Image (cartoon, rainbow, N blue to C red):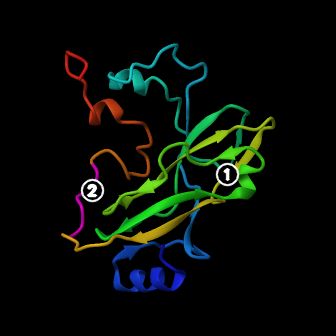
Amino acid sequence: MLSAESITWLIEREDLEWPGQLRGDGLLLTLGAPLLPLATPPPPVIDLADQASIDDLYGESVTEWTTYDLMPGEMVLGPVADPLRLGAGLMGMIGGLSHLARVGLAVHVTSPFVLPGWDGHLTLELVNTGPATLRLHHGMPLARLLVFALDGTSTGDSASHPFYGREADLKSRYADEFPLGPSGK
């Protein structure tokens, strides 16, 4: 894991682009816009092999907001306010803030890893696992990203991913990325 001093040095060299704040030895991730809630009521079945079925899971995007009340059991997707670019020799790991976990807010429910060459806005999956409604505020700190240097030689920046990193494109693109053929493979 890289120290704040090493991260600052990488930013100065432009091997890492981050306009946001540092917190300790990590990048402080704050909540941006838009928010994308899941549909209420949800569709009865989501076919993960059918992108249109996945798209039916999402409600209307909330673009202009200062606060958002996240109900118990509710999930919304939200971009990190500041874009991130990692060089090919760097990767990251998202860690939620324990203060928020202690009131029931989970800030990511997937793999915490950000792969080398990432370029764009990270998406956080916000889930209220607690018993009370939680009021989210635009720009509030939610998590931090620890930065790691990879061993070995680098072959240059990885190509940006075709489905992720765009601030307004928060939906899952699973079926687009992993199409299943007629045999289900």
| Residue 30 percent coordinates (x, y) | 59, 60
Figure quadrant of the C terminus? top left
Q: Please check the rendered image and state whether residue 132 is part of the magenta-colored stretch, yes or no.
A: no
Calculate the distance from the C-alpha at mark 1 to the C-alpha at mark 2: 30 Å
The residue lying at 53 percent from left, 71 percent from top is 20
**Amino acid type, callout 2:** Ser
Where residue 160 is drawn, which disc sits there?
2
Q: Nearer the viewer, residue 140 or 23?
A: 23
Q: Which residue is mark 1?
A: 66
Local secondary structure at mark 1: loop
**Amino acid type, callout 1:** Thr
The extreme top residue here reads 44
Q: Is residue 126 above or below residue 31?
A: above
The residue lying at 41 percent from left, 26 percent from top is 54
The residue lying at 25 percent from left, 24 percent from top is 180
Residue bounds of the magenta highlight: 156-161
User: How many residues crowd mark 1 within 10 Å: few (<14), some (14–19), many (20+)?
Assistant: few
The extreme right residue here reads 132
| Residue 141 percent coordinates (x, y) | 65, 61
Where residue 185 is drawn, which disc sits there?
none
Q: Is residue 94 above or below residue 22?
A: above
User: How many residues crowd mark 2 within 10 Å: few (<14), some (14–19), many (20+)?
Assistant: some
The residue lying at 25 percent from left, 28 percent from top is 179
| Residue 87 percent coordinates (x, y) | 32, 70
Left or right relative to 46: residue 32: right
Earlier-in-chain disc, 1 versus 2: 1
- Tell me where residue 48 sits by quadrant: top left
Q: Nearer the viewer, mark 1 or mark 2?
A: 2
| Residue 113 percent coordinates (x, y) | 44, 55
Q: Please check the rendered image and state whether residue 160 is part of the magenta-colored stretch, yes or no.
A: yes
Marks 1,2: beta carbons within 8 A = no
